[in-house]
């Protein structure tokens, strides 16, 4: 997932962009230059997409909270909240994450009915 435009870009597209030297280290989709300070700039760009209520960006922010990446403290309950919000906005990937939480009873209370 690209934090600049919240698009999933395959590795083949990234490779072709670099091979054809379209733009060095730029997003193959929106052509935004890659962040120099990856954690800080990427998180800032991601938060702009989250503020715009982009479901994939919200889901990805949940991933970062779940793993404690990009300087964020690991917080599985916050990740669960973000995935729920993303799922309500239509993210299928977030639905998968929530299903895995309930299946493994991680970060959520065990609920046999669900």
Image (cartoon, rainbow, N blue to C red):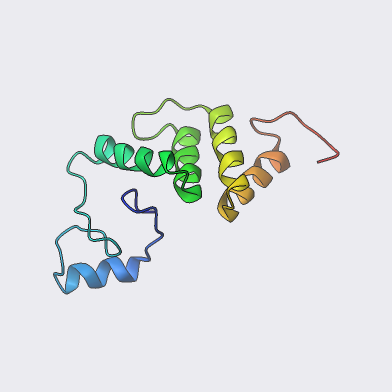
- Residue 83 in the image, given as x and y percentages of width and height: 57, 41
- Residue 27 in the image, given as x and y percentages of width and height: 26, 59
Q: Quadrant of the N terminus?
A: bottom left
Q: Nearer the viewer, residue 104 or 81?
A: 81
Q: Is residue 11 above or below residue 106?
A: below
- Residue 84 in the image, given as x and y percentages of width and height: 61, 40
Q: Nearer the viewer, residue 70 or 87?
A: 87
The residue lying furthest to the front in this view is 52
Q: Relative to residue 35, is residue 87 drawn left or right? A: right
Q: Relative to residue 109, is residue 44 drawn left or right? A: left
Q: Relative to residue 106, is residue 25 drawn left or right? A: left
Residue at x 16% of width, y 69% of height: 22
Residue at x 71% of width, y 35% of height: 105
Q: How many marks?
A: 0
* Quarter of the rendering containing residue 80: top right
Q: Nearer the viewer, residue 105 or 99?
A: 99
Q: Nearer the viewer, residue 106 or 93?
A: 93
Q: Is residue 39 above or below residue 6?
A: above
* Quarter of the rendering containing residue 14: bottom left
- Residue 106 in the image, given as x and y percentages of width and height: 65, 33
Q: Quadrant of the C terminus?
A: top right
Residue at x 74% of width, y 28% of height: 109
Q: Is residue 42 above or below residue 20?
A: above
Q: Relative to residue 61, is residue 23 drawn left or right? A: left
* Quarter of the rendering containing residue 50: top left
Q: Is residue 12 above or below residue 41?
A: below
């Amino acid at each position: 997932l690209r934090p600049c435009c919240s698009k999933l870009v395959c590795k083949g597209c990234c490779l072709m962009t670099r091979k054809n030297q379209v733009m060095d280290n730029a997003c193959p989709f929106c052509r935004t230059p890659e962040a120099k300070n990856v954690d800080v700039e990427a998180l800032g760009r991601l938060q702009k997409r989250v503020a715009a209520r982009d479901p994939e960006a919200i889901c990805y922010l949940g991933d970062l909270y779940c793993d404690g990446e990009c300087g964020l403290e690991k917080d599985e309950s916050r990740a669960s909240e973000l995935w729920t919000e993303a799922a309500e906005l239509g993210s299928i990937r977030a639905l998968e994450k929530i299903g895995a939480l309930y299946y493994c009873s991680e970060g959520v209370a065990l609920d046999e009915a669900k």
